[in-house]
Every structure is written in C-alpha cells, then in structure tokens.
Amino acid sequence: MIEVKGIDSFYGKAQILSDLSFSIGAGEVVSILGRNGAGKTTTMKSIMQLVRPRNGSVTFNGTEVVGLPPYKVAKMGLGYVPEERRIFTDLTILENMEVGRQPARKGVPEWTIDLLFELFPNLSERRNNRGKALSGGEQQMLTIARTMMGNPTCLLLDEPSEGIAPVIVEQMAETIMQIKKQQLTVVLSEQNLHFARLVADRAIIIESGQKRFDGTFAELDAQPDIQEKYLSV
Amino acid sequence: MELFFAQLLTGLANAATLFLVASGLSLIFGVTRIVNFAHGSFYMLGAFIGYSLMQVLPGMFGFWLSVLLAGLAVGVIGVIVEILVLRPVYKAPELFQLVATFGVILVIQDVALYLWGADDVLGPRAPGLKGIVRIMGEPVPKYDLALIAITPFFLFGLWYLISKTRIGILVRAATQDREMVGALGVNQAWLFTGVFFLGATLAGLGGAIQLPKGGADLLMDFNILAAIFVVVVIGGMGSLPGAYVAAALISILNVFGVTFLPQSTLVLMFVVMAVVLMIKPYGLFGREEVAGEHGQVGEPERPIKPAGLKVRLLVAAGLLLLALLPVFGSDFSQVLTSDVIIFCLFAASLHFILGLGGLVSFGHAAFFGGGAYVAALLVSHVDAPMEIAFLLAPIGAGFAAFIIGWLCMRLTGVYFAMLTLAFAQLIWSLVYQWGEFTGGDDGLVDIWPSAWLNGTTPYYYFTLVFGIGGILLLRHAAHSPFGYALRASRDSSRQAEATGINTKRIQWAAFTFAGSLAGLSGALFVFSKGSVFPTELEIARSFDALIVIFLGGVKTLSGAVVGGASLEYAKDFLTRFEYWRLTLGLIIIFVVIVAPEGISGTLRKVAERFGIIRQREGES
Ligand SMILES: Nc1ncnc2c1ncn2[C@@H]1O[C@H](COP(=O)(O)OP(=O)(O)OP(=O)(O)O)[C@@H](O)[C@H]1O
Ligand SMILES: [Mg+2]
C-alpha cells in the first residue's frame, strides 16, 4: 500500500532521513519506533509531503506522491494525525470535524459524525465546545476523529499516546483496534513500546533517520540488544 | 435633536461603504495574512467600473445591476491579482507581499488614469431614490435610507457565510493553521483565491454603491485606505460585527465632526482609534493574537559580521565617488544625489527598527516629515537660525517617536503597524488642518540654509556629511551591544527577557533613535528644497521607505541603502514618462516575484556564486 524507497529528507541543510526504505501492506498496522529526534515525525511528514524528500520515492497504491501538494495526498486517502494535534482551537468540535470531511471512498466503510461520536463518547458530549476548551486527551481524540472524517484508507498516527494518561492510552488502543477492524491500514509512530505492542503487527525501528530493524514483535523480542540500543526502555 | 437624528442617519449611510470595504480587507487579512494595501484601489475600480456601467444600463434596475456587476468585476480583478502577483510570493517572508500589493496600487492608478482620465467623475444619482424624505423636519436623502437598510443584509449574509457554511468553516480553520487544512485534503490555494475574490468584490461593491454620494476620482484609493485600516483595527481583525460597529462609529463621529468641530474631522478618527487600542489592544471585538505570529520578518538571519575587506574597499570607493561628484557632475546630479542620500538615510532609519527590531512601522513618515516641520516651524515662526533649527529637528522627531513609541509598544505585529500608521495620520491631519500654524496644504516655504551653505555644492557636502554620517551611525548602533540586544528581542523575546534584557524598553529606545534619524533626514530635506508640504507626512511617504526596505532586502542595512538609491534614481528617470506609475509598479512586482530576497540579498547570492564574496556559514 505504501512503498518508501530510499528517501532523504532535510530541514534546510540538516539531513534528517537518509536512504530510508520500508513498505506497508494493505490492512497492516505497523509501528515506527525510535527515540526522541530519531526522525519518526519527519518520516510521517515525508509520506504526507509536508516535508518533501529530496531523493527517493514514496508511492501510495502505486502512485508516486513525492512532489504532490499535501492536499492531493490527503485526497488519495492518506489520513494524517499530527503529533502536535493542531486542532483548530477557535472552531467547535463539530466544525473541526467538518474541516476534515471528504466524500466516501470505495473499499472502506464510510465514517459519519455519529459513528465517530460512538467511538469517542467524550467528544459527543462537548460537540459545541471550542477546541481550546478541551483537555489534552480530548484534543487527541478530536484530531483522530477529524482525520477519520476524510474516510482514509490509510491512517498515519504520530505518537497518539504522547502526554496522555495511561487509562486513556488503553482506551486509545481499543479505538485503534476498532479502526483496524474496518480494514484500515495504520502507520503508528511511537516511543511507547508497550502501546505499540498492543496494537501493531510489526515494528520498524529508526535511529538518526536510518532503519535499524524491521520485523515482528516476536523477532524484536529475540534481539534484546536492538531494544537496548535504539529504544529507551 | 432633529438635527442630531438626521446626522445620525447620514453617518449610518456613510458607514455602508466603509463597512463593505473594510470587511473585505479584514477577511483577506484573516485568511491570507496579507495586508492588502491595494484594497483602496479595488474600491476605486469598483467606483469607476460602476460609473461606466451606469452609463449604459438605464433605470433603477440598471443602477443596481451596475453596482452588482462592478463588484463582481472587481472580484475577478482581485482573483487575477491573487494568482499572478501573490501566489508566487506566498512563501516569501510574511509582510513581503505587501510590497507586491503596493506595486498593484501603482499599476491600477495608471490604468484608471488611462481608462477614465484625470478628471473627477460625478456619480449618477440612483433612479427612483433621487429625492429626500423629511424626518422630523430634517431632509434626509432617500438613497441614504436605502443604504442604511441594505447594510444589515450584507452584514448578515457575510456573517452567515463565515459562521454557518462549510466554506466559512474552512476559511476560519485556514486563518488558524493553513498547513493543517491542506493536510486534511483542502486545496487551500483555491481557498485563498476564493477569499480574495470575496474581499475584492466587497471593495468593488463599496466603491460602486457610494457613487451617488461621492462620485469617483483618482485619489479615492489612498483616501479610503487609512479609514478602512482604522475600522478593521478598531473593530478587531477578522470580526465582522466589529467592522460594522467601527464603521458606524467612525462615520457618525465624522458627520458630527463636520458640524461641530470642522477643524478636527480628519484627526478625530485617529484619536478614536488610539483611545480604543489603548483600552482594548486588539480592538473592540478582536481576540488576542499569538505573539510573534505576524511580526515575523523573514527567516532568522545569518549572524551579522563586520564587513570584509573587499566590501570595505567597495564602500570606500563609493564614498570617494560621492565626494568627487561636484568635480565632474552637474548641479542637477548633485541635487539628485542629495535627494537619494536623504532618502537612503530615511529608509535606513526604518530598517533599524524593522529589520533589526522586527517592528513593522507603517508610519515612519511621521518622523521624516516631523523633522522637516520642526525645522520649518522654527524658522518661520521664531526666526531660528538654520543651525539651531537643524539641530532641533532630530530632537523634536525623536521626542515624537518617544511618545508614539511608548503608546504603540504594547502591541505587536500588524496591530503595532496599524497603530503607527494611525499616529502618523494623526500628525498629518494636524498639520493639514491647523492651517494658521502650519500653513496647511500650502506648506511652509522660504526655509533656506544659512549663507555659508548657499549654493548647490556646499549643501551637497553638508548632506553628504550628515546623511552618510547618519547611516554610519545606524550601522555602528547595529553592531553595538544595543543592536545585539535589539535583535535578541526580535528573535526570541522570552529568551531575551530571561537573560535580563528588557525587550520593550530596548525596542522603545530603538524606535526613538530611528525616529530622530528620520527627523535628521527630514531636516536635510527641508533645507535642500526650501519648503515642506503635508505630503512629506503622508502614508505614501511611509510606504516608500517600506518598499525600499523590502525590495532592498530586510536582512541587511545595505539593502535599505541599495534599495533607497535604486528607487530614487528609478523614480527620477521614470517620472519623465506619462505612465511612470505603471512602469514602476510593474518593476516592483517583478522584483518581488523574481527576487524575494530583495535586490541586495539576490546580488549577494550572485556574488557568492561567482566567488566575489566569501560564502558565509550555513548558507548555500
Ligand atoms: N522544523 C525543523 N527544523 C529543523 N530541524 C528539525 C525540525 N523538525 C525536526 N527537526 C530535527 O529533526 C530531527 C528528527 O525530528 P523528528 O521530529 O522527526 O523526530 P521524532 O522521532 O519524531 O522525535 P519525537 O519522538 O521527539 O517526536 C530532530 O533532530 C529534530 O531536531
Ligand atoms: Mg515526533
């Protein structure tokens, strides 16, 4: 579904990703793991074209996306949930979700506001509250709900568990499992190995913008040195 | 009481136009973050196009159809401007685009001159609404009543569009985080274009709808500019009800001003604005802006280093050339070069607060013209010797900057810019309307230098010494601890505060210093021309300096100087032609698009590529 081949990404002169390649199959839930500053967010942004890779290629369902404006990538069915949440604080919950709305897509069940409110009951209660009046966890739910309104076939989730109370993290894992049941492909950036293990089928570990590991959690458990070296346990 | 009520109605009728135009400006700014100086030009075009349409479309139906079509035509012009001029420069540093919109003003001025001629156009009266109605015995034009009735519909329609429709939601979301809106699958380029269309249409409607009251002329663009900025700022950026209330407030005050205080009409508006902003810094209905969001001028610059040997030699050679000019140059070339030096000093003083301080002032002419007027007033009222007047001019301008700076310093970004504009207009209108003291429109004349500076060459050297001296002083200040503290306050005010720098105080001091050097250039100016007129305090004068800085390159002082020299020489050359504004406007737009780093930044890149100057760290 997503094919990343040899991308190099930069912020100005600083090279963040070098020769990074991996692929994500349809229906998979893959977790990108790595320490702070490893380049997880940059990888997500490079897929979404919020950062344009200087070399290499990113294809989505066989179509090259490098060079496209982000809105076109989003329209192809890639849903991006940013790490910093970036909800529209002056807009209400309903309005935030409206911004994300896109027509239904073939092959995935359509998400409606009601379905999403079922998934995130907290949001339902506060549907007419402005974004700035929400707690951190509620904001995180809203970013996910907002992106789901676009009926994506593949979801890029950047550290959804960051800064959220453990109870809510469990809830979040539950939600992602439900989303997964809808045949959605999910790419999840995480530092929290526990959370990643709960939801993901496979792990990709990056460090200094390079891939260090790619395999199942069972394979990862068999190589404790890798965990030690690239993940702050 | 009857008169009072009738005047209230006149004020409300006048508010219609002001509200339409100002709400368009506010909308465009809210989403694109572009301060569209060309908005007054859209308004003017609306009036002229409406006038032409009314000549061919008869009757009541034709009148209102003309108004509507004029609005839509201007909307289309707005779209063309957005696509051709602004799209290429969205990525450029914020506020850079305003220079492009200034180029658009110049182009539209000449196009209007070509199409409609230089004479004022008397607006046709609205068929079916020609007469008056007596309300409590006072005559009220029927058309005024129609305007009063129409405006709320526009207000409601716009409000509905913005707060209830999907488009409105997207627009509001884009106001906050354009990139995120794009990442959610919305083509924001078209959103911008759409907003520009709507904003320009509103301006065009405003221009056409006021035809029966005000007609059309070539000065409309600048004449309304200050007023709509004031309305937007008083009402609060992006607030539609705010724009309506502010438009009504300003218009009503204006009508009463004409009756009861005819000397104060122009001043009144700015006094109201200053008072409102001092009580509510973000306007009546505005919400607090995130600090630093709009004040950003370009990317963090490379560290300023002392000039290298080659650059020093180049500067020395240039100075030598200037010093020898009287030997080989004509009188005319000396006068022209004096003008250039004076203007460069003015621009350099603005650069000091804008480039180094990140304080975008739209009203720097207040201090240039202020200095000129201080000197001229001293000479004509107390017969002060030229030397004393010359000395007191920068002090006077510095004092004005000290006061205005204190009043403006609590604001940031565009609000700061607007407030400086308002104070500059306040000073302008004082000078303009207080005729007995300042000469008003006739200016002050016979302000000549002392005998020892008589003649072109002596005064040329005088200008050279003080002009270049002033520029070098600015440069010296930029490299002093004061200059470093100023830049620290701009780049990261919180960190600067943490290291014990009182950022506001530093900026205030810089504002005062820059004001007094602008005053120095004004003093040089007045004695070289022998006269001064209110034009030296006008918005256009402030914009001249702004353009020069953005075109020259915000990041370097040399940019201001190079830009200043280019603009003055270009103007001198171009003004010999009939449609010079068009040419200059196109040149400005061209430079903005091809050289978004400004002339000096681009020259530097070229020079670096060819190895003329050393590449600096962190640049490719
Ligand atoms: N806008 C930027 N400009 C310059 N450098 C940046 C920018 N954003 C990130 N970086 C740098 O790029 C590197 C990778 O950042 P990235 O955000 O991809 O890391 P991450 O793995 O997501 O980290 P975290 O777990 O903290 O979110 C870091 O060294 C960071 O400092
Ligand atoms: Mg990250």
Image (tube, coloured by chain):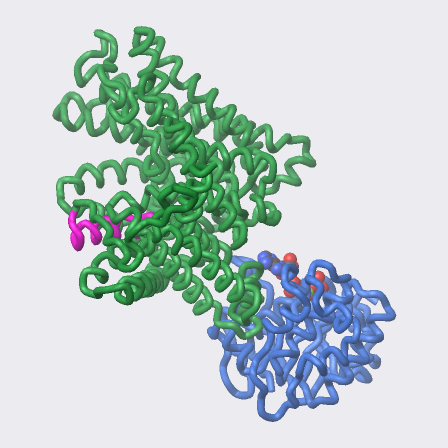
Chain colours: A blue, B green
- Does residue B192 appear to the left or right of B506 in the view shown? left
Q: Main secondary structure of the magenta part?
A: helix
- Residue B281 in view: yes
Residue B108: say if magenta: yes
Q: From this viewpoint, which residue is outermost toward the front?
A: B137
Residue B542 relative to residue B408: left or right: left
Could you tell me which quadrant the C terminus of chain B lies in?
bottom left
Is residue B304 visible in the rendered structure shown here? no
Tell me the residue at 54%/50% (across/down). Answer: B242
Q: Nearer the viewer, residue A166 or A208?
A: A166
Across and down, in percent, residue B69 comes to: 30, 65
- x and y, in percent, of residue A231 in the image: 78, 68
Residue at 66% x, 35% y is B497
Farthest residue to the right: give it: A167
Q: Nearer the viewer, residue B216 or A20?
A: B216
Q: Which residues are magenta?
A: B102-117
In this view, B226 is above or below A232 = above
